[in-house]
Image (spheres, rainbow, N blue to C red):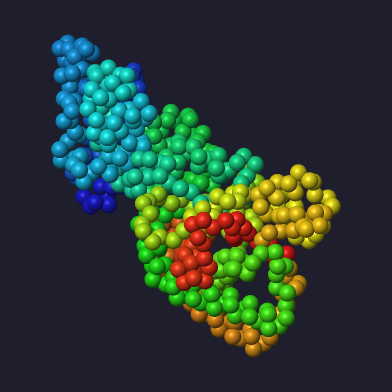
Amino acid sequence: MSNKQNENLIQVFTDEYFEKLYYFCLKKVSDKNEAEDLSAEIAMNIIKELRKGTVPDNISAWVWKIARNKYSQWADMKNKRVNTFSGNDIDILKITDNFNLDDDLIQQEDIKLLRRELAFISGEYRNVLVAYYVEFRSIKDISDSLNLPIGTVKSKLFRSRNILKEGINMAREFGMLSYNPEHINFLVNGNTGELGTPFSIINRNVCRNILIATYRTPSTAEELAMEIGVALPYMEDEISNLVWNGLLRQNGKKYETNFFIVSAKAQKSASEHLKLITSDLTDKIIALIDYRINCYEENGYQWHEGYQPYEDMKWVMLIEKVDEVHWGVIDEIKKSRNEEYAGRTKRPDGGEWDLLGFEERKKYEGEPAGVGMHGIQYKFNYKNIRDKTPNTLTVEQRAALTAVAKQNISEISQSLLDELTGFGYIEKTTDNCGYKPTFFVQFKDKIGELTAEQTKIYEGLYKEAHKIMINHYNFCKGIVYNEIPDFLKNDQRHIDFACNNISNERGAVLESALEKGYISYADNDERKMLGAYLIL
């Protein structure tokens, strides 16, 4: 029989008999844990026989014959155990401080697989397993720290052995992610919904574990319930919510994670490539800024309101120019596919957001700082800059800032003005009757146009930066395409979103500009409004 035929038979068995086997065993033994152990043992024996090439004439009769035989063997063994020792004799089980699943199964190089499976073990076992297999603590130490009898510790280790052995042999990926779901970070782009999505979902470990479990291994609700240790009715509720919000998708009887999780390896590859092009890209970005400003001044334009020193405004102009070139790359790519920007994904509770997962990884020396956009301000994860201003501003606070910039504060409450003054975004004018911003403010209608000759030169400089950035984008796209699950390979929204957020040109150019002396920041620097701006 061919391997394909073999796998087809296994698929038939897993689709049609897994759940039935469990209920067969539950009816026989009347204990949930024992039924799980017995049904898992029967299933493993059946799959083992099918992989050997066994071709049953009648698969249903064959399955149930094996199930009945295995139950009979199990019952005989249980009777012998009952007759020879009691629950107090648990010490005779071969669980010692030198215990392992099997010497040929759990070796040091397999520890990642073991860690992966720990996320799919129910809570009553997980603490014991983590302490024993990951922290390498003795059974007595575990007994003392968890306030459990030594016999109970051994019993829990013994009972979970088959579950671990079966899981380790499964073709799951992203081991460390499922071992510790807190090691996935999420990037959300857009506006949350009325129900607080997606944060109300991704901040819950059970949802994270479902999304991790189904990311590379599409699973049924029954499989997820067994793996994660959640009763099936509750699991079905969780799955239904994830599907409704678009984070899971159903494919037949199985569920798949409906967004991309970028591995640590992919992130590092993107960063390594970025290092090769950063210096040249930074030179081109600086040339664009300097030429544009020189043109404004030659043409006599008042291109900003003068609230902030030019050296401070460079921080905004630098990142804004990176964004201008970056989005020019995205527009070119979309035009080549005859696409228009469709906005963020609309969600059923009124939110509009997209989600990307990142495997947490150890930062390496020289990796650029992150730069995010928060309302009216670029936030720099560089030294202590980020913490000098609020992470976000409310809609009312942003409207008040705009009113101050336009010198129209008659309808703004004093409490709002006081808040913004305390944050450092505005200050009282010398006559003590009004307020002014403390950061970069620019009115579009005051900027004016470049001459035809100036525009030609500027476009030439722009193309040089554009070429560098599109090459980096294409490199990132290759990384994403190699990793993204097959069912997402034609989803340009997910691919573009991932590429946009692993390229990290902002941070790289920022730090390169600091190295080149284009901008500066001392350890004792007191400036607060770096990165804040309004263009009106």
Number of marks present in the image shown: 0
Residue at 43%, 51% in the rendered image: 358
Q: Position of residue 364 (x, y in %)?
A: 36, 57
Looking at the image, which is closer to me, 114 or 445? 445
Looking at the image, which is closer to me, 54 or 469? 469
Q: Is residue 365 left or right of residue 373?
A: left
Q: Position of residue 299 (x, y in %)?
A: 71, 83
Residue at 65%, 46% in the rendered image: 350
In the orientation shown, which residue stands out farthest toward the bottom? 453
* Corner quadrant of residue 475: bottom left
* Corner quadrant of residue 14: top left
Is residue 301 at all visible to an observer of this figure? yes
Check the image and report above or below for 46 versus 148: below
Check the image and report above or below for 231 versus 253: above
Check the image and report above or below for 322 versus 155: below
Q: Position of residue 129 (x, y in %)?
A: 29, 31
Q: Position of residue 2 (x, y in %)?
A: 23, 52
Quadrant for the C terminus, please: bottom right
Residue at 55%, 83% in the rendered image: 460
Residue at 80%, 49% in the rendered image: 412
Is residue 154 at all visible to an observer of this figure? no
Looking at the image, which is closer to me, 522 or 488? 522
In the orientation shown, which residue stands out farthest toward the right? 410
Q: Is residue 256 left or right of residue 129?
A: right
